[in-house]
Image (spheres, rainbow, N blue to C red):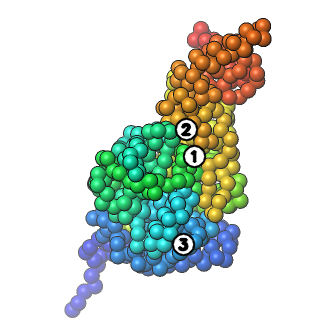
Amino acid sequence: MATQNRFAPLGQSGGYTTMETFPNFSADTLHCHELLSQEEQALRLRVREVMEKQVAPVIPKYWERAEFPFELLPVLRDLNVAGGPVKGYGCPGLSPMSFGMVMAEAARVDCSISTFLLAHGSLAMATLLHLGSDKHKQELLPGMAELRTLGAWALTEPDNGSDASGLRTTATRVPGGWRLDGRKRWIGNATVADVIIVWARNTESGQVNAFLVRKGAPGLRVVKMHHKLSHRLMQNGDVALEGVVVSEEDRLPGADSFQATAGILAWSRVMVAWQPVGVAAGLYDMAARYCRERKQFGAPLAAYQITQEKLVRMLSTTQAMWTLTWRLTRLYESGRMTPGMAGMVKAHNSLRGREVAALGRELLGSNGLLADFLAGKALADMEGIHSYEGTYEVNTLVAGREITGYAAFKAAGVRATGPGKQQQGQGQAGDSSAPMQSSMGMGWGGGPCQGCPCGAGGGTCSCGSTCSTCSKGSCGSDTCDKEGQNKAERAAQLGAAAVSSGGSSSRTQGCECPGQEPVASCRRGGNSACACTPCKQQAEQRRLGQARSKM
């Protein structure tokens, strides 16, 4: 007589439903979808269905092998979302909010797929549209929109991540074009890309320019980064440029300073902020289903108070992240978003997304360590989001500068203080606090320069000005004046002016603001003889420090 099998079936699932059958979406108890237009809602549902039915079943095996699922390219192509808001040339021309929904829904199932679309579309394709020539657009964008031509975007270097404006890759003019030399690291899509947009410093002007480097170019070497624990499907690579020669026509004419780079990064930061929202939603859905399925001590996990507390915390945090990012995107669409807003939301979401991921992993217990159950994989992916497109710390400092007026990117011992200060080595953080203007759905870092023309590093301020004497753009340099002039020359001119007027120079010793004028752009500060706001604040801070030391 046959007996009923009391044991769960052997295999990865242990008798519980894995991500191969993705859980129904349930992470919108506040009906936030009602804040979307009909078109945005329709796209959201279309992407969700494709990700759940066609993408989710194959993700674990590719995650295990750290390979990109090329078999899914036709599926993604049919969605017609590559390039997002890029218009014309066969591109979809989505609204920023619509593309945010694409980022979130893709990340809900697998963050590597979301990041692939981000690097290919929001970085490479957007750069070509706004900074490339007509020839670049006509040649590359149609194929990129169909995912037949894949793109990568190479800014980060081994020694320059958050400090992106300090890049060392160089572009040297040669007959007929440019020679590129340097290293790039963590470049998404690098090993599969047909074209890489390389950012390099022009050795003539000191400005940051962008160049198209084609697959197989002599002197180009791309090596896959192995042993990654996050975004394992994403093909990140080390890129070596050893005398790579590109033609003049493959220099992007619109990329004439680091401000062009900052404009692209500002837009992509909004899209990255949607990724933790999607990751958190997927984790909540998976954890809620699992806790209803699994029984311990004679009852489903979902029946226990501590489980319900964790689920409620996951859901409420996910809803808060969604609402915050929705508002940020609407501000971006209306041209009112500032870099501080984007930095604050990206930092908030990456921090809270990690918390949701950790709770989801806890609720799934040991099964949460298996890629088949999403939680461990998503937890690792959240670590990547916490670091790219500006680390949590850097994005926090971008927001902090905007609300206080003080830039704190450098250690206290090597930076000057004062509202409006722009510093060398700010990298991605070196945007102004003015609203980002929307251009065909893309943001551009705008606003007036608030400090030294060479303050953003590498001879380039965020407004695109160039220091005429200090090629490395060090605001704290002993020779670089805030007008982009040699200090000794400037002092001589001021002295001569004082003599001719029968007076003395109004420029006080140790301070680089013009005399007693109450300005907020003094780069050094700390001179008690100067009446400008930064100097007075620095002098007061020093006085308080001396008083504390005597206590």
Mark 2 to mark 1: distance in Å? 8 Å
Q: Nearer the viewer, residue 503 or 394?
A: 503
Q: Which residue is mark 1?
A: 259
**Callout 2 crowding tier (Cα within 10 Å): few <14, some 14–19, many ≥20:** many
Q: Nearer the viewer, residue 290 or 279?
A: 279
In percent of width and height, residue 132 lies at 52, 59
Tag 2: residue type? Thr
Query: Measuring 68% from the left and 12% from the top, which residue is drawn there?
Result: 495
**Callout 1 crowding tier (Cα within 10 Å): few <14, some 14–19, many ≥20:** many
In the image, residue 432 sits, relative to residue 188, either above or below, namely: above
Mark 3 and mark 2 lie on one chain; the one further toward the N terminus is 3
Q: Helix, strand or loop at disc 3? A: loop
Locate the N terminus and report the quarter of the image it occupies.
bottom left
Query: Measuring 60% from the left and 29% from the top, which residue is drawn there?
Result: 484
Q: Which residue is mark 2?
A: 460
Residue 389 disc label: none
The residue sitting at the left extreme is 1
Figure label count: 3
Q: Nearer the viewer, residue 106 or 86?
A: 86
Q: Nearer the viewer, residue 16 or 154?
A: 154
Tag 3: residue type? Tyr
The answer to whether the residue labelled 2 contacts the one labelled 1, judged by CB atoms less than 8 Å apart, is yes
Q: Is residue 535 visible?
A: yes
In percent of width and height, residue 377 lies at 38, 61
The residue sitting at the bottom extreme is 1
Q: Is residue 354 visible?
A: no
Query: Measuring 62% from the left and 42% from the top, which residue is drawn there?
Result: 463
Q: Helix, strand or loop at disc 2? A: loop
Q: Which residue is mark 3?
A: 89
Tag 1: residue type? Gln
